Amino acid sequence: MDSPFYGVSIIFSLSLFLILSPHTLAALPKTSSSSSSASASGQINSNSVLVALLDSHYTELAELVEKGLLLQTLEDAVGKHNVTIFAPRNEALERQLDPEFKRFLLEPGNLKSLQTLLMFHIIPKRVGSGDWPVSGSDPVRHRTLSSEHVHFAFKGSGVKLVDSATIVRPDDVVRPDGVIHGIERLLIPRSVQEDFNRRRNLRSISAVLPEGAPEVDPRTHRLKKPAAPVPAGAPPVLPIYDALAPGPSLAPAPAPGPGGPHGHFDGMAQVKDFIHTLLHYGGYNEMADILVNLTSLATEMGRLVSEGYVITVLAPNDEAMAKLTTDQLSEPGAPEQIVYYHIIPEYQTEESMYNAVRRFGKVRYDTLRLPHKVVAQEADGSVKFGNGDGSAYLFDPDIYTDGRISVQGIDSVLFPPDEEPTTSDKKSSPLVKVAVKPTRRGKTIA
């Protein structure tokens, strides 16, 4: 311990430390700083453009970002580079967006399409309002986070465009790591639009009907020739009575059979449209409730219109429907019988019916409740249906007319002449579908 070499070794060690310490100290801050910056890159501070988007007045877009489970992805993108976000107005997502398309985006199975659409609104670089191409120059293309491209263009009067959307609030939110521009409408990438169209077409395609064995003619013992195909838009070959679903005497809530290849019209959408029109028109909620909730007639009407048939609905208003008793609606199939008597298998408007009764006096119209017909005649400058106390006047003409479905509002519920609605002991006859050929329209009464 008292050796002279002990003191020399201590002095040598201290000298070596002092020589190497500047390099050591220079290396230590560099390492700690790189580790701290890496940890900061995975975090978003309160001044980030992503936080500003979630707290901004673009609430609809922020809600879609949360439903699309994109918060972590956007945090990573903002941590790596500046971003430019195109935020549609709330009105564009609430009222101007197709409800069917919005429903498609929010379905759990279409999460990938929703994420692609949202990332189509984000560019992984900072593009301010002053970076747009000038007037007369070619559009500039930028790559988005969805790997698809948007095009920047400049229109006259200082209007800036991104694809087909106008920038209505340039540089609306500016932060150190990005900028938000307000746009007038939603940007829809081609891939999402094609996916939506593909899903919609697949949903409208019905199941393929199985084909049975070939039929043999018993007289010639030869195969029967298949029927000639019906051209698109041609009137149906069969009477409408043969196309009706089984009545309530056979099934309490019949579902329509699978449609064939001749469904040239979107009958379901047309029936839905006319029922919405009834509700918005006001005073016909009970009729709409019977068609949709109490029976399956709305579905059956949509199937008939899809097959090419046309119908005219005589819709009693709520005041008339309120006069129906419980006994009149409690019998099995009674609501269907009442509605069938108010459906004419022709397309009639207020003008066509009034011209017919003016010319022929009384006109018998076929109904879907065979064999009963409804009588129409002129009265007080309008059209009156039925006779005596059970008559109804054309109260609200042409509530809905689209060329295939016509809805005419009347002020009373119609019953066939052989039924007395005021007599409670009489029970309505069960609905029976008879496959007979309908008589010619507009048959006059002698």
Image: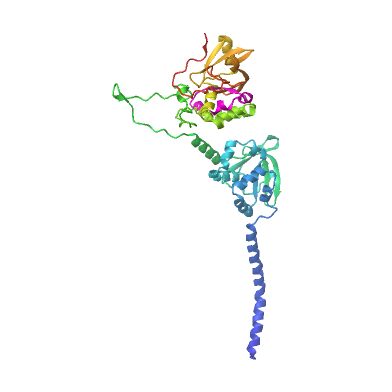
128 with respect to 364 (left or right):
right
Q: What range of the chain is rendered magenta?
A: 304-330
Across and down, in percent, residue 350 comes to: 60, 17
Across and down, in percent, residue 319 comes to: 64, 24
Across and down, in percent, residue 320 comes to: 62, 23
439 with respect to 291 (left or right):
left
Tag count = 0
What's the coloring here? rainbow
- Residue found at the very far left of the displayed protein: 221
232 with respect to 85 (left or right):
left
Q: Considering depth in this image, is 29 or 99 the residue closer to the camera?
A: 99
Q: Quadrant of the N terminus?
A: bottom right
> Is residue 4 visible to us here?
yes
- Residue found at the very far front of the displayed protein: 425
Q: Considering depth in this image, is 105 or 220 the residue closer to the camera?
A: 220
Q: Residue at x 60, y 28 (%)?
A: 286
Q: Considering depth in this image, is 211 or 201 the residue closer to the camera?
A: 211
Splitting the image into 4 quarters, where does residue 30 fall? bottom right
> Is residue 265 visible to us here?
no
Q: Considering depth in this image, is 399 or 419 the residue closer to the camera?
A: 419
52 with respect to 346 (left or right):
right
- Residue found at the very far top of the displayed protein: 446
Up-down: is 173 above or below 321? Answer: below
**Residue 223 on the magenta segment:** no
**Residue 316 on the magenta segment:** yes
Q: Residue at x 60, y 16 (%)?
A: 389
Across and down, in percent, residue 201 comes to: 50, 35
